[in-house]
Amino acid sequence: MEYGIGIDASLGLKLAEQRELVGEAKASGYASAWTPSGPATRDGFQVCGQWAGEGLPVGIAVIPAPLWTVQSLAHQAGTLHEIAGGNFTLGIGTGGIYGAEYRATYGLPAWPVVTMMREYMTALRGLLAGRAVSLDGKVVHLRGLQVTGRPLPVPLYMAALGPQMLRLAGELADGVSLNWTAPGMRAQVREAIAAGADRAGRDPAAVRVTEYIRVCIDDDVDAARRAFVRAFIGYALARPGASKDHGYRGHFRRMGFDAPLTRIEERRDAGAAEAELVDLFPEELLREMGYYGPAAGAPAALARLSEGLDLAIVRVVGVRPGLEAAKAVLRGCAPGAV
């Protein structure tokens, strides 16, 4: 088992402070540093380029593929791979393309999601291998495109929640980026990955299973819980009128959490304020998703939450902004203590 550190813009850290945190993570025994990338955050490629100077392998987990062209992702990933001395990993995901509001926001058509990811992964692999790629798909259209004259072996990870995407990751990806997945689901995750790998004649063990594990450390347990739920609520609840079968909401339904989330959604739709909704999340659900509370309880909780993974990425959740709150999480989850 390896442990990485996950840092995002919600912590309110300057780039120099993020880099300091990455440097301390290396000294504390973390194996890698990761960041998400998207329209509401700093550019993940630029951030990882800043972090690479600390000598720790870096990665994006994940970037929404449909907001980029395949060739742009290949250019960025290949360049950063060289800057980082061969220690950069690119993770891609679907974004929210399954939702009409997301598609309207970014001017995207209703592409078939699994097909989209298959075409992106196939094209990226070819381009990063230095080959000229031709692909006339439903989403990706390339004719003889070549972005490098030599192979740039960037590991490609794929965000996956449901069985179809997990099988596709087993077929095409170097790793799977899970998110908000309870430990009890990991065996099913690996079964689906293995099915895809077998179909492609690959060794399932070659596909690394990784996940962000959110951790919020503070002696004020109520404050830590509230910060944790605020990080969770945007994933957990379906938008009013949206399907509860797709994306994260479908993911939580498959894990057996539909009933409590439906009750919270009903209170929200009746006009309840966020503070009330935060109180409604049951402890048994939250404790399956991550850890919040004093530092003393973090190592045992992280060990339990990491079961079945190859890499657990401690995603820092802060009660209050600032570097010290982030360092409290980093130190409380130091790999040597887990």
Image (tube, grey):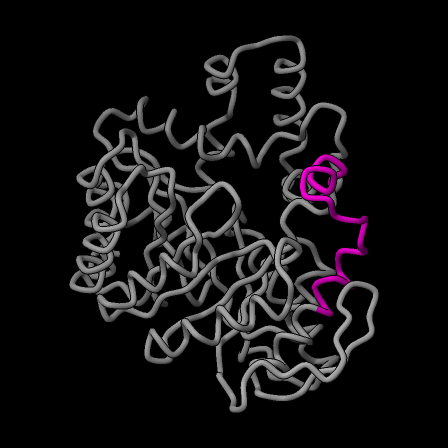
Q: Position of residue 9 (x, y in %)?
A: 38, 42
Q: Is residue 43 left or right of residue 31?
A: right
Q: Nearer the viewer, residue 218 or 41?
A: 41
Q: Is residue 295 left or right of residue 8?
A: left
Q: Position of residue 313 (x, y in %)?
A: 38, 56
Q: Residue at x 72, y 84 (%)?
A: 144
Q: Is residue 323 left or right of residue 89?
A: left
Q: Residue at x 73, y 44 (%)?
A: 107
| Residue with the most extreme top position | 271
Question: In the rendered view, would you say 261 is above or below 63?
Answer: above
Question: In the rendered view, would you say 176 is above or below 230?
Answer: below
Q: Residue at x 51, y 24 (%)?
A: 281
Q: Position of residue 109 (x, y in %)?
A: 80, 49
Q: Which image quadrant is residue 115 in?
A: bottom right
Question: In the rendered view, would you say 72 is above or below 36?
Answer: below
State yes or no: residue 68 in magenta: no
| Residue with the most extreme bottom position | 150
Q: Nearer the viewer, residue 313 or 87?
A: 87
Q: Nearer the viewer, residue 308 or 69?
A: 69
Q: Which residues are magenta?
A: 99-119
